[in-house]
Image (spheres, rainbow, N blue to C red):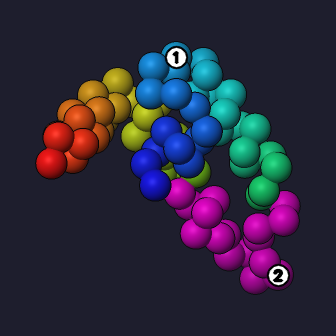
Amino acid sequence: MNYYEILEIPQNASNSEIEHAYKKLTRLIYNDEVDKRGKVSDYYISIRDAYIFLSDPVKRAKYDLELEHSWKK
């Protein structure tokens, strides 16, 4: 699954759309996903990682190039 699919947004999403999707998903799952020891789930970590990459213009550009390259294979 790619970062855009994780955040449920199109590849041409704006920065505000990325932030909105991240906040929406984290609110929906955070309380349900944190166990009694305070450990977060792999899904929550995936959402966080997707946001980190897609909200940074340099990281996003590199990621988009990697996606494009992988689709051509």
Q: Residues within 10 Å of mark 2 (few under 14, many from 20)?
A: few
The label nearer to you, 2 versus 1, is 1
Q: Secondary structure at mark 1?
A: loop
Query: Start and end of the magenta stretch?
Result: 31-46
Residue 37 appears left or right of 10: right
Q: Residue furthest bottom?
A: 37
Residue 41 lies in magenta, yes or no? yes
Callout 2, which amino acid?
A: Lys
Q: Is residue 46 above or below residue 70?
A: below
Residue drawn at (58%, 69%) of the image: 42
Q: Amino acid at mark 1?
A: Ser
Q: How many marks?
A: 2
Left or right? Give the position of 73 relative to 63. left
Q: Is residue 3 visible?
A: yes
Q: Residues within 10 Å of mark 1 (few under 14, many from 20)?
A: few
Would you place residue 19 above or below residue 69 in this image? Answer: above
Q: Is residue 48 magenta?
A: no
x, y percent for residue 16: 60, 18
Q: Find residue 29 and report its image quarter.
A: bottom right
19 relative position to 63: left or right = right
- Provide the residue designation for mark 2: 36
